[in-house]
Amino acid sequence: GHHSIVLRIQVSMPSALAESLVQLSVFVESMGVMGYAAVVGLNVVCIILSLPVLMPIQVVAGVLFGAVGATAVGCAGRTIGLSINFFVARTLGRTRGWSVPLPEKYTAKLYERQFWAILTVMLVAPVPSSLRAFALGLMDGIMPIKFIIAVVFASIPQACIGSLMGAQAGNLQEALAQVPEPGMKSMVGLVLGCAALAGLVAWKSRKDKSTKTE
C-alpha cells in the first residue's frame, strides 16, 4: 500500500515529504482531468513562495500524466507564477520608485536584446527563479510580453527533467527514489538573494532621494 511505498523511499527523502507526495498523487489522480489544473496551481504557489519542492512535484506529475502532459502543466505553472512575481514587482517599482541599480551600459544592452537576456537570466542565474522574475520586474525597460515568452522557453527544459524522470519510472515508488532531498542550498540561495535584492533597492532609493534633495 501507500505506507510501504513511503517506508521504501524514506532513504532518499524525509518521510513526511514522501508521504505528502504519495497523498498528492492519490488526490490528483482522483480528480481526473481537473488534476492537471491542480498541479498547475501547485506549481504557481511553489514558484511564488520559492518552495524547493518543484522537482518532486514534477516527478509525480510525470508518473501521472506522462512526459508531455507533465511538462505542459509544469511549464504553465512556472510561467504563471513567475509572471505574477514580475507584475507584482513592476507595480511596486512604479508606485514606490524601486528599481535595480544597474549601470546604463548594461541596461542598454539588456533592453536591446531582451528575449535572450531574460532567457539567460532565468536559466543560469544562481538565485531562485522567483527572485529573478522579481528583479526583472523592477527593471522598467523590460517588456512584459518578452518576459512571458522568454519564461515559457526557459520553463520547458526545467519542467521536462522531472517529467521524464517520472514518466520513465516503472511506478511512483521507483520515481520518488530518484528524487534528491531538497537541501539547505535552495533556502540559503533564497535568503542571500532576498538580502542582496533588498540591499540594492534600498541603496538605489536612498541615492535617488539624495539626488532630489540636492
Image (cartoon, rainbow, N blue to C red):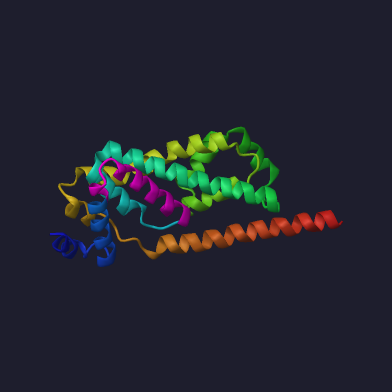
Q: Looking at the image, can residue 190 be seen? A: yes
Q: Residue at x 15, y 47 (%)?
A: 170
Please name whichever residue, 112 or 23, is drawn nearer the observer in this view of the structure: 23
Where residue 193 sits: x, y (%)? 53, 58
Up the image or down, 20 lies above or below 28; here it is below
Q: Looking at the image, can residue 102 be seen? A: no
**For residue 173, which quarter of the picture?**
bottom left
Residue 92 part of the magenta-drawn span: no
Determine whether, in the image, residue 71 is placed left or right of residue 132.
left
Up the image or down, 109 lies above or below 193; here it is above
Judged by its main secondary structure, the magenta piece is: helix
Up the image or down, 211 lies above or below 3; here it is above
Determine whether, in the image, residue 109 is placed left or right of residue 167.
right
Where residue 51 sits: x, y (%)? 41, 58
Up the image or down, 50 lies above or below 166; here it is below
Magenta segment range?
28-49
Please name whichever residue, 2 or 207, is drawn nearer the observer in this view of the structure: 2
In this view, the residue farthest toward the right is 214
Q: Residue at x 37, y 51 (%)?
A: 42
Q: Residue at x 63, y 45 (%)?
A: 139
